[in-house]
Amino acid sequence: MVDRKTDISDLACGFLQLADPAACACSADDRHWYQFARLVRDCSARGDTLNLQSAFDRLEQFLIGDDAKLCDWATGFLQTLQDVTSWSNQDGEPFLCFMGERTRHVWSTLATIRYDLAGCSTLEAEVLMWRVVHPTRQAPLRS
């Protein structure tokens, strides 16, 4: 069985020369998604392709793996990376060449949803995007 916190921590700690100790204590909350998104954005700005490829390879593993929580974390991270890159003059385009097939699919799906929500109020768009990225899992119906 995969330990979600360990895997996420390993992903952040793969950037030891870049990450502070707090980034290595990752959990599925916005603060850690934003920390990691900034690390990835900064790697891109410096042209650090080795670490970028390593990060996106690991994200691809999370997305295609059997652990739903790791998949949720990776999806939340990709949404956050889109948020972080939309605030700067660097959009998400430089990351596409590092993404695996599943990561690219999730990235483009989130971008499409973001575009579709452009006419909504900020609060409404944030709530709707949160519901897409973090769906509630319903218990199976009992006969």
Image (spheres, rainbow, N blue to C red):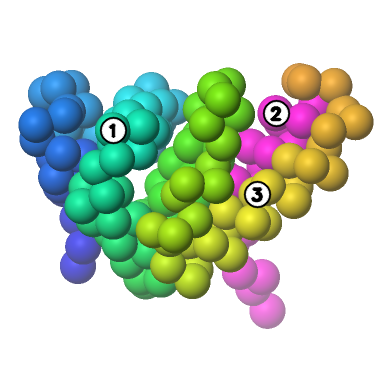
Looking at this view, is 10 or 69 the one in front?
A: 10
The label shown at residue 126 is: 2
Callout 1 touching callout 2 (CB < 8 Å): no
Q: CA distance from mark 3 to mark 2?
A: 12 Å
Would you name the residue on which mark 3 appears? 110
- Name the mark nearer the viewer: 3 or 2: 3
**Where is residue 129 shown, x and y percent of the image?**
69, 39
Q: What residue is rendered at 79% in x and 42% in y?
A: 115
First in sequence: mark 3 vs mark 2: 3
**Crowd class of label 2 (few under 14; some 14 to 19; many from 20; radius 10 Å):** some
Would you name the residue on which mark 1 appears? 46
Q: What residue is rendered at 9% in x and 31% in y?
A: 17
- 101 left or right of 120? left
Q: CA distance from mark 1 to mark 3?
A: 26 Å
Q: What residue is rendered at 27% in x and 49% in y?
A: 49
**Crowd class of label 1 (few under 14; some 14 to 19; many from 20; radius 10 Å):** few
The single residue placed furthest to the front in the displayed view is 47
Callout 1 touching callout 3 (CB < 8 Å): no
First in sequence: mark 1 vs mark 3: 1
Q: What residue is rendered at 44% in x and 60% in y?
A: 97
The label shown at residue 25 is: none
